[in-house]
Image (spheres, rainbow, N blue to C red):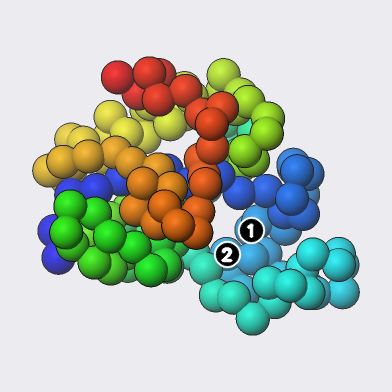
Amino acid sequence: MAICLLVIHAISLPPGEFGGAGIIDFFVNRLDPEIHPYYKTIEEMRVSAHFLIRRNGDLIQFVSCARRAWHAGTSQWMGRDRCNDFSIGIELEGCDWLPFEESQYHALAALVTDLRRRYAIEAIVGHSDIAPLRKTDPGPLFDWSRLA
């Protein structure tokens, strides 16, 4: 399906901790559940994203935009189910209770600009917009006006 949606997420592994290898290991299915007690609770999950923006603004691509990533889960946008089929997932290293970094907003703006040049993007939404009963990210401290 044609890409028409960008989904903004927030993730930190372990929760509330930044800079470690947890997110990368999680997205490439090599997270060691023995490293942290929280990892045992997610060891069976298989999740991926197209992009991750670290706290310092570094951008890492995990999945080609031409392929489906498994970032949205059970989701719906404008009456369409299975948002993974028509969206690109962008993860920001963060959580609901801490603000995002200036460098992340700069990297996100540049990425969104590039993706809008390549695809007919109809909307940019949060994970909470497409799965409101189970997700809260990118959270209340994400500044949506920065993407305007």
Amino acid at dot 2: Phe
**Residue most extreme to the front:** 133
Give the secondary structure at mark 2. Answer: helix
Q: Which amino acid does label 1 sit on?
A: Ile
- Residue 2 lies left or right of residue 5; in this view the side is left
Q: Distance between the residues labelled 2 and 1?
A: 5 Å
What is the crowding at mark 2: few (fewer than 14 residues within 10 Å), some, or many (at least 20)? many
Drawn side of residue 35 relative to residue 130, left or right: right
Name the quarter where the C terminus is drawn. top left
In the depicted view, which residue is nearer to us: 118 or 48? 48
Residue 84 pos. (x, y %): 32, 64
Q: What is the x, y in percent for residue 44?
A: 64, 81
What residue is drawn where x is 57% and y is 19%?
A: 102
Query: Residue 116 location in percent, x, y?
Result: 21, 36
Which sits in the foreground, 97 or 20? 97
Q: Residue 27 carries which label?
A: 2
Counting from the top left corner in percent of width and height, residue 105 is at 48, 24
- For mark 1, what is the residue? 24
Q: Is mark 1 on a helix, strand or loop?
A: helix
Q: Quadrant of residue 144?
A: top left
